[in-house]
Amino acid sequence: MYDFSADSADCARAVEAGLSDYLTGASLSGPGPAAERLVAAMRHGSLEGGKRLRPLLVRQAAAIFSVPRQDTLRTGLAVEMVHCYSLIHDDLPAMDDDDMRRGRPTVHRAFDEASAILAGDALLTHAFSILADVQCHADPQVRVRLVAELAAGSGAGGMAGGQMRDIEGEKGGFSETDIAAMQAMKTGALIRASVRMGAILGGADARALSALTAYAEAAGRAFQLADDILDVTASPESMGKATGKDAEAGKQTLVGRLGIEAARKMLDGIVNEALLALRTFGPRADGLRATARYFAARQK
Amino acid sequence: MYDFSADSADCARAVEAGLSDYLTGASLSGPGPAAERLVAAMRHGSLEGGKRLRPLLVRQAAAIFSVPRQDTLRTGLAVEMVHCYSLIHDDLPAMDDDDMRRGRPTVHRAFDEASAILAGDALLTHAFSILADVQCHADPQVRVRLVAELAAGSGAGGMAGGQMRDIEGEKGGFSETDIAAMQAMKTGALIRASVRMGAILGGADARALSALTAYAEAAGRAFQLADDILDVTASPESMGKATGKDAEAGKQTLVGRLGIEAARKMLDGIVNEALLALRTFGPRADGLRATARYFAARQK
């Protein structure tokens, strides 16, 4: 039987160790030696913390196709580095202006703004280095598909575009549909890419990829809705970052429109939708099933 | 006989048209539609202007191996998008704090800081989309090599690392060797990557790649030294951006240490070094030769 706690803890440990090994002067050097302060800022923004849910999704999706855990790690590191870069840039004064992240000072507070901008840029850049390398997967055709998938999920029609719309939405005038579309890009696109990259590692056919994409889109919506609920209900201490920020910033969320109780019911419905998308897969999809349920149940 | 003016003008036109075609909602969409404001900011930071020297280097290096011009365009677009992203981020208030670029307001002045950060992020991301796509090159093995090369040139041991060191150098204490090492990363690494990516498109063997790398490293040093000389000698009007900024910012340059005349002599020596690295190539390397000479002679 699938053990979510054990698998997610194992994945988080592997990602932490993998990032710590990779984010060093030796691996990050190019034509010149990696700049020490930049490496330090990249490490500050990536190590010690984070639930590493995106690498877990890569691993769980690949598990459907019996890909060994360790063969999904490099792909997971790439997705996690993109996630970490986005947090570093989102925390900047010109964006969300956050001082704390995961219970520690944000990168621009611990270093400075220029270092935070460059650390985000370099994490994004090296995420693609990892995917292009033969250690990620033996077949270059698979590697270019991973690159394309990660770029689509994190670009103008994905995460970065969603962040842009979120900023525009703070000015008001967003409908519930606009909010849902924005969140599907800002948070959903990288979750979708994670699941699809796991499927690509597993050599999924078009039908399986389509089912897993449906799962991922529902899971992404569940994740975001749970996050919005937690922003209203959880304490800053349990989250390791400021809460109540959405309301304070005038940010439009579904929870704000619907109220907590209706939002919780909606969350259950979305999780069921995610589970339904997995119905053709056997017990090897139990990991993805457990993660969808976790999204609804998590307390931080 | 190779005509530098005609080829560089043709390349600039092709890159301008290529970027204008690519930087649209249609091409940049992912799981969601590309955010309009983000696309507009990306276009502002990429179109109308720029000498497009890096795509020209891709084309000229590939020409040695008889690769048709049009087959180098997508690779050139990717390199140029990385160059443009770096300018957008370098211009930010937390970095060089520039108001003007290519005679127009910088992206954060024309839009706002958040949009400029995201536009840079998205240009970097989509540069890798272009390289991963089959339209770039039919062989996925070539495409992953291009991804790896671009990432190495622009990451922590390349351009981004060089920018970090440049910021550190402003605090003083940099030797001439430190300055040269910083410039080799900040400016040289992407020039090096451009030449090498052209060589990779051409299927260069290890020996040719090594000679072209030597050319590119010398050309990069020539380019940077010429830029530093122009910062002292040229007018803001001819450059379309502020000049004299290096001295004002307390930035360490070789020109500041050596004086203009000694720097000009050094520049001639470096150009000769670049030409020497091409000695085993016939007239098909005339493009690269002309560009090295242009670096030394350019007035803006």
Image (spheres, coloured by chain):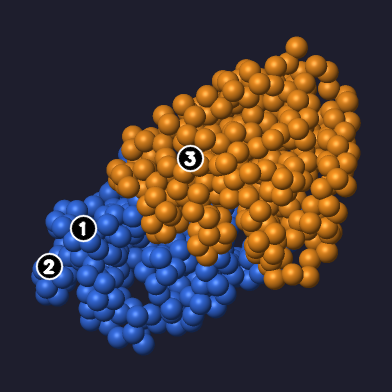
Chain colours: A orange, B blue
Q: 10 Å neighbourhood of mark 3: few (<14), some, or many (≥20)?
A: many
Q: Is residue A219 visible?
A: yes
Which residue corresponds to mark 1?
Answer: B179
What is the spatial separation of the Cα atoms under label 1 and label 2, in whole angstroms?
Answer: 11 Å
Say which of A115 and A251 sits in front: A251
Q: Describe residue A75's horizontal placement relative to residue A210 as left or right.
A: left
In what quadrant of the picture does the C terminus of chain B appear?
bottom left
Q: Describe residue A204's horizontal placement relative to residue B271 as left or right.
A: right
| Dot 2 amino acid type | Arg
Residue B128, given in percent of the width and then of the height, sits at 56, 49
Q: Residue at 83% of width from left, 35% of height from top?
A: A271
- The chain letter under disc 2 is B
Instruction: Judge if badges 3 and 2 mark residues of a common chain.
Output: no
Residue A27, given in percent of the width and then of the height, sits at 38, 35
Q: Is residue A224 visible?
A: no
Which residue corresponds to mark 3?
Answer: A46
Which residue corresponds to mark 2?
Answer: B257
Residue A110, given in percent of the width and then of the height, sits at 39, 50
Q: Which label number is shown at residue A181? A: none
Residue A179, given in percent of the width and then of the height, sits at 78, 58
